Amino acid sequence: MIGNIIIGENITELQYRDLDKISYSTLSSIDRDMHYALKKKFIPSDGTKFGILTESLLFNDYNPEEYYILNDSIIGDGKLKTACDMMFPKIIENVEILEESLNKYINEIIFILDENKIDYWEKKDSKWRAQKIISEAKPYWVEYVKGLGKIIITSKMYLDAKQAVLTLTTHNFTRGIFSTNSFLNIEKFSQVKICFNYAGYEFKSMLDWLIIDHDNKIIKPYDLKTGAGSADNFEKSYFHWRYDIQAFLYSKAICALRDRDYPDYKVDDFKFVYISRKNV
């Protein structure tokens, strides 16, 4: 650490998210839902997991020890699995110590069923539904508990992420960006973590991809987005998730990096690269 800038810290994705500093995600969440933003635990959604996994494979820092591939075949693809995939992360989010006995969390399950529109035996009362879930989903819950402390993914998610990487590294629009080939006087950096001070507050940013062109003295920043919708819908997502805040904050982080290490370089416009995880 030099001054207020930490560059390229050798920490995992989850460790970075545990740093007690303001992030784009925090600001975006406050803008959309302050209560959500004040959660104590970071519980990644399937979309977030897919993004983390794709980036780790793309940037050659995939560590299988950080992931747990969930055996979701034990529950099938019906409404029970859909209900569990909605409930289990919420249970993990709100319980400090987890146990393999799902029956211990019947009150949490009833609360989640009451608070969320979960399509599973909707005409029955919540207690009946909770007991049915407990009786039928125990093996699936045990699988979840095994993955504690890791990023829980599925085999399909892993294969889809590998396909996304193949697309990004071969498509005419993106292969020049994400190629790992380093040409003379061009450096490329992935997952650059920067902690910096702005307007009297401590912030953190993790930049997906930086290209530093030393011949032309330009720093080119990119952020990869892996959404569920088509590219045509990215503009709507841009404003919903307040990516404008991210672009502003990350640009400040890059300027902090530039001011420290490359004072006579220009910072290029911040660019987003979008790929749909359903059409990779």
Image (tube, helix red, strand yellow):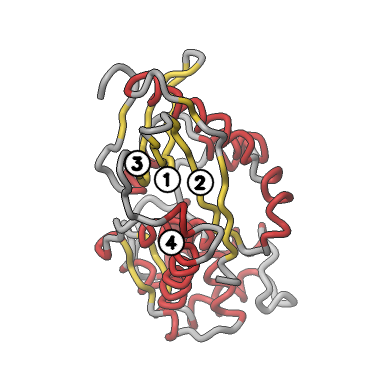
Residue 200 vs 204, above or below: the answer is above
Residue 59 vs 259, above or below: the answer is below
* Left or right of residue 270: residue 97: left
Q: Which residue is mark 1?
A: 209
Identify which amino acid the numbered label 4 is placed on.
Thr
Q: CA distance from mark 2 to mark 1?
A: 6 Å
Q: Which residue is mark 2?
A: 223
Neighbourhood count class around disc 3 (C-alpha, 10 Å): few under 14, some 14–19, many 20 upward: some
Between disc 3 and disc 2, whose residue precedes?
3
Identify which amino acid the numbered label 1 is placed on.
Trp
In the rendered structure, are the residues bearing label 4 and label 3 in contact, judged by CB atoms less than 8 Å apart?
no
* Discs 1/3, front: 3
Can see residue 117?
yes
Q: CA distance from mark 4 to mark 3?
A: 24 Å
* Discs 4/1, front: 1
Between disc 4 and disc 3, whose residue precedes?
4
Q: Quadrant of residue 280?
A: bottom right
Q: Which residue is mark 4?
A: 54
Identify which amino acid the numbered label 2 is placed on.
Asp
Q: Which residue is mark 3?
A: 186
* Discs 4/3, front: 3
Q: CA distance from mark 4 to mark 2?
A: 12 Å
Q: CA distance from mark 1 to mark 3?
A: 13 Å
Q: Which residue shows up at 34% across the image and 55% down it? A: 180
